[in-house]
């Protein structure tokens, strides 16, 4: 009789104010309306999040189901057809309402969905982009920690998505603690993440949810840059 090698262990950890969701515990299941596709749901209301984030793994010809609220897509690998446009790896789009999304080849895409909070009657419009066209900006003057903002800094948007790149050995300059919550997907490299009073080794493929006011800090470890995609709610009064 062969026993599982992990013997019940996993790097995944759930605490009241954060979640580390590691690939060794991923469960895949299609969402309603998906065709030739499956989802790994990382965060949602069940864990305390006010948004939903999942990885969609799509076969050629696969389709996402209907959106629940506004939707942001980031193509990790493969290619998507959204409306009349094509999005390859490193491309992203914002969809304020449902648009058909179809994979033209085997594709992995990060999906963020959030109910929209209207303000001043301004409504966002759909847009697409690619990280290659966004000039990285140093975080707080640190050239070893670079930020690429994927959502316009405009009042009609109630969330932000950034791509963060850390040179080997670089780290956040402070332990952050704030009202925004985060959804974070490690895309490459690795390091150490402090979440609350816990310290976790993290690597490509890991997902992290951080609740409001969860103390957080990251330092990159290894010989290659660490990069992650991070969501936060913002641009709205706390009330």
Image (spheres, rainbow, N blue to C red):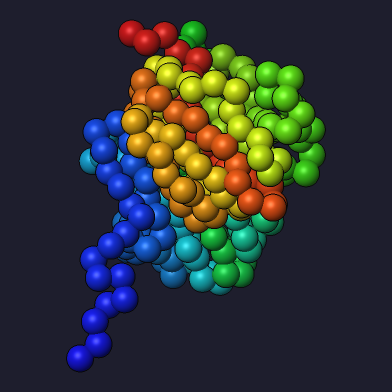
Q: Return the residue nearer the eye: 68 or 47.
A: 47
Where is residue 199? Give x, y as percent: 40, 39
- Position of the N terminus, as image quadrant, is bottom left
When asked about the image quadrant of residue 29, the answer is bottom left
Is 172 or 113 nearer to us in this picture? 172
Q: Position of residue 95 (x, y in %)?
A: 54, 38
Answer left or right for 89 relative to 40: right
In this view, the residue farthest toward the left is 1
Q: How many marks?
A: 0
Q: What residue is rendered at 37% in x and 50% in y? A: 21
Give me the residue at 60% from left, 46% from top.
Answer: 221
Q: Residue furthest bottom?
A: 1
Image quarter of the C terminus:
top left
Examine the rendered structure and indicate whether residue 188 appears above or below residue 67. below
Q: Foreground residue, 238 or 140?
A: 140
Q: Residue at x 72, y 25 (%)?
A: 142
Measured as percent of width and height from the top left, residue 124 is found at 56, 25
Q: Where 238 falls versus 98 (above or below)?
A: above
Residue 133 visible: yes
Expressed as whole percent of the image width and height from the top left, the position of residue 195 reads: 39, 33
Among the 4 quarters of the image, the one containing residue 137: top right
Question: Would residue 158 be found to the left or right of residue 168 on screen?
Answer: left
Q: Give the residue at x 49% y 8%.
A: 120
2 sits to left or right of 204: left
Q: Is residue 70 visible?
A: no
């Amino acid at each position: 009789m062969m026993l599982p090698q992990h013997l019940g262990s996993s790097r995944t950890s759930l605490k009241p104010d954060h979640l580390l969701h590691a690939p060794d515990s991923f469960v895949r299941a299609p969402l309603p309306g998906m065709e030739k596709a499956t989802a790994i749901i990382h965060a949602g209301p069940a864990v305390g999040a006010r948004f939903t984030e999942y990885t969609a793994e799509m076969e050629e010809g696969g389709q996402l189901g209907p959106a629940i609220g506004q939707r942001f897509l980031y193509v990790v690998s493969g290619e998507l057809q959204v409306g009349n446009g094509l999005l390859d790896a490193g491309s992203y789009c914002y969809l304020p309402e449902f648009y058909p999304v179809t994979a033209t080849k085997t594709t992995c895409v990060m999906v963020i969905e959030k109910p929209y909070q209207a303000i001043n009657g301004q409504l966002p419009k759909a847009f697409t982009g690619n990280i290659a066209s966004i000039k990285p900006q140093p975080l707080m003057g640190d050239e070893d920690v670079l930020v690429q903002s994927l959502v316009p800094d405009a009042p009609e948007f109630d969330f932000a998505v950034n791509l963060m790149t850390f040179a080997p050995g670089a780290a956040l300059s402070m332990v952050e603690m704030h009202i925004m919550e985060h959804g974070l997907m490690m895309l490459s490299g690795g390091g150490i993440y402090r979440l609350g009073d816990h310290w976790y080794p993290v690597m490509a493929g890991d997902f992290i949810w951080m609740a409001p006011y969860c103390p957080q800090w990251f330092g990159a470890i290894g010989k290659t840059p660490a990069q992650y995609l991070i969501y936060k709610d913002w641009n709205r009064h706390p009330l």
